[in-house]
Image (cartoon, helix red, strand yellow):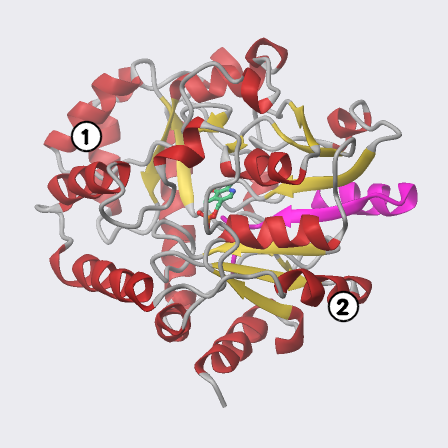
Amino acid sequence: MSLEHDYKVAISSVLQTTPDKIFLYWKGRVGLFALLKAKNIDNGDEVIMPAFTCVVVPNAVLYTGATPVYCDIDPATLNTTLDIIKKKISSHTKCIIIQNTFGLSSEVDEITSYAREKGIFTIEDCTHGFGGTFNNAPNGSFCDASFFSTQWNKPFSTGLGGIVMVNNPELLQPLIEANKGLIKPKLTKSLMLEILIFFRKNLLNNTTYWFLLRLYRFLSKKGLVIGSSSNDEITSTKIPENYFMASCNTQAKHGINALKHLKPLLVLRYENSIKYNNFLKENGKIFYPENLLQNHSFLKFPVFVKNRNEFIHKAEKQKIQLGDWFVSPLHPLECELTPWKMEMSDFPVAYEKSLNILNLPSDTKEPEKVLQFLSDNINDLLNASNTN
Ligand SMILES: *Cc1c(COP(=O)(O)O)cnc(C)c1O
């Protein structure tokens, strides 16, 4: 059988589904777009989503002609809630996107049952949640369909890559129909991906990290190397050329291999994050309450600092690799958001969180080093009482 089929078998075994319910794409956002197309989401339709997401999510909606309708978030979970969503539902609402944020899909069960009663389609943005569980069921298994990403920093990586899991069988035929429009990636594109994966595996270490990260960002901005997002994609709301792209064998090959190492990685992320959480709690800083821990898979661990740039700078000196999701309610846009139909002042919690957030590495082999760094800079962290 083909590499793609073997990859689908490996994916479906983690997600506890069957390979025929799994579809592969060049990126996660392409899978989302395919789902919206399969549901005939169009001009005049509204799609509900959190105001704390990646700009490529509203972009996929805008490309269909539909309107993104944003919901503010709960500061404890960094996710939106059923109560907030209910207030945003109108006669035009066709779809609700429920996001797994940093590994947590809070209220996904309640939101999905509510939407089902109302006849509204649900998609889980499970780009942070592959391999985790919610109330003991696999992340991604609650909504009508879900999409996953295997981009560099996601639960497992194929460089770039997207997966869709269909849970509602009525969606299978329309999605297969929509997928007929997919463009095959050129051989040069797959080769470039192969080279980038090689570089990352063999040259990326704690010494070269900052240099290579800057180089990659610079080259992908210039369009000289395939990046996660082209410059056009984050400065406009028009669909980029060759957006609707299929996956390739390079992704399948690396995916099969990466999935073999996923279990210990999930354990490491969880154990490190519990250490971070205990530390923050003991020191009166913002932490996750006990009841949220069981359903969290901690792709990254969010912390909130007084001065982000200063904190990043200090961390770099100590060679601590911090992430910067979500520096904006529509990450990574730090500009006027009206072209994306968002008025930032309407989402005070998301906005405030985006000003102070950074992410600790949950997959580090040296959590003590991170804890020591936090301890040395404890006064730079926001107190729990400030925002919780
Ligand atoms: C990464 C990410 C996406 C998009 O995934 P791609 O594979 O890069 O298209 C969507 N939503 C969120 C929340 C993400 O973090």
Label 2 sits on residue = 173
| Location of residue 158 in the rendering, given as x and y in whole percent from the top left corner | 37, 62
Amino acid type shown at disc 1: Ala
Q: Residues within 10 Å of mark 1 (few under 14, many from 20)?
A: some
Q: Is residue 173 shown above or below 367?
A: below
The secondary element bearing badge 1 is classed as helix
Q: Is mark 1 within 8 Å of ligand 1?
A: no
Label 1 sits on residue = 315
Q: Is mark 2 within 8 Å of ligand 1?
A: no
Q: Going 43% across and 67% down the picture, which residue do you hit?
A: 263
| Location of residue 330 in the rendering, given as x and y in whole percent from the top left corner | 50, 27
Span colored in magenta: 106-130
Query: Mark 1 or mark 2: which is in front?
Result: 2
Please say whether residue 129 is visible from this viewpoint. no
| Location of residue 78 in the rendering, given as x and y in whole percent from the top left corner | 56, 30
The secondary element bearing badge 2 is classed as helix
Q: Residues within 10 Å of mark 2 (few under 14, many from 20)?
A: few
> Going from the N terminus, do you reach mark 1 or mark 2 first?
2
Q: Is residue 23 shown above or below 240?
A: below
Determine the image quadrant of residue 354: top left
Question: Which label number is shown at residue 40?
Answer: none
Q: Going 53% across and 71% down the picture, which residue do you hit?
A: 11
Q: Going 39% across and 68% down the picture, which residue do you hit?
A: 251
Q: Residue furthest left?
A: 207
